[in-house]
Image (cartoon, rainbow, N blue to C red):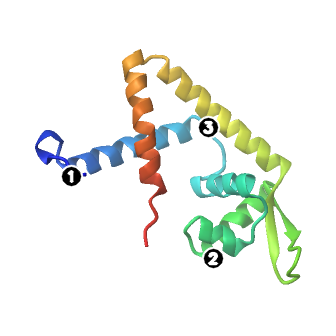
């Protein structure tokens, strides 16, 4: 369904503004939960929590990065006792990485801090602004779910 571009802002401006706004929000949310974990480590922990133990290669593929980079991320998480190695159930040559109790606690602490900060800020918005943000969530989610081929 084609729409008239006359009534909508230029797409290049929308792209710039959306990129800046999402980046600022992500940086602010990260600063609301200080800690030693970087974004890549946090993302790997979140995936292990959601999907269960994974090999380095499978986790790298899921996170769209090189296995060598994921190996470095997992080594840091292992040093912090946030992940632990497990034997692969069917292939003795492979190792699975699983989130540990400490890793789960770190995820919970960070998630709670981010949620509390965002709730406090949204309470300062008027109901129409909150409704506008809520209406945009499916569109933002759709953007995040596009896979490049």
Image coordinates for residue 137, horizontal then vertical, percent: 45, 38
The tag earlier along the polypeptide, 3 or 1, is: 1
Q: Quadrant of residue 129?
A: top left
Q: Secondary structure at mark 3?
A: loop
Q: Position of residue 9 (x, y in %)?
A: 18, 42
Q: Is residue 95 above or below residue 126?
A: below
Which label number is shown at residue 39?
none
Along the horizontal axis of the image, is 110 left or right of 138? Answer: right
Tags 2 and 1 in contact by the CB under 8 Å rule? Answer: no
Spot the residue most to the bottom.
93
Q: Nearer the viewer, mark 3 or mark 1?
A: 1
Q: Which residue occupies the foreground of this view, 58 or 113?
A: 58
Q: CA distance from mark 3 to mark 1?
A: 42 Å
Label 2: which residue?
A: 68
Q: Quadrant of residue 117 in the image?
A: top right
- Label located before the other in sequence (2 or 3): 3
Residue 22: x percent and y percent?
A: 40, 43
Residue pointed to by mark 1: 2
| Residue, disc 3 | 33
Q: Earlier in the sequence, mark 2 or mark 1?
A: 1
Q: Residues within 10 Å of mark 2 (few under 14, many from 20)?
A: few
Q: Residue at x 42, y 16 (%)?
A: 127
Q: What distance separates the C-alpha of mark 2 from that of mark 1?
A: 44 Å
The quadrant of the image that shows the C terminus is: bottom left
Element type at mark 1: loop
Using the numbered discs, state the Cα–Cα distance from disc 2 to disc 3 in whole angstroms: 27 Å
Tell me the element at label 2. helix
Please tell me which residue is depicted at 28% across the width and 50% down the height of the picture.
Answer: 15
């Amino acid at each position: 369904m084609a729409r008239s571009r006359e009534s909508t802002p230029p797409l290049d401006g929308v792209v710039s503004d959306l990129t800046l706004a999402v980046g600022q929000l992500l940086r602010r949310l990260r600063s609301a939960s200080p800690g030693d974990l970087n974004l890549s480590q946090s993302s790997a922990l979140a995936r292990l929590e959601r999907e269960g133990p994974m090999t380095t290669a499978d986790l790298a593929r899921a996170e769209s990065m090189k296995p060598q980079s994921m190996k470095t991320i997992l080594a840091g998480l292992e040093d912090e006792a946030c992940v632990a190695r497990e034997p692969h159930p069917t292939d003795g040559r492979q190792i699975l990485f699983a989130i540990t109790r400490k890793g789960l606690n770190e995820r919970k602490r960070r998630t709670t801090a981010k949620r509390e900060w965002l709730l406090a800020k949204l309470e300062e918005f008027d109901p129409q602004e909150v409704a506008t943000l809520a209406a945009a969530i499916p569109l933002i989610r759709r953007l995040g779910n596009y896979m490049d081929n």
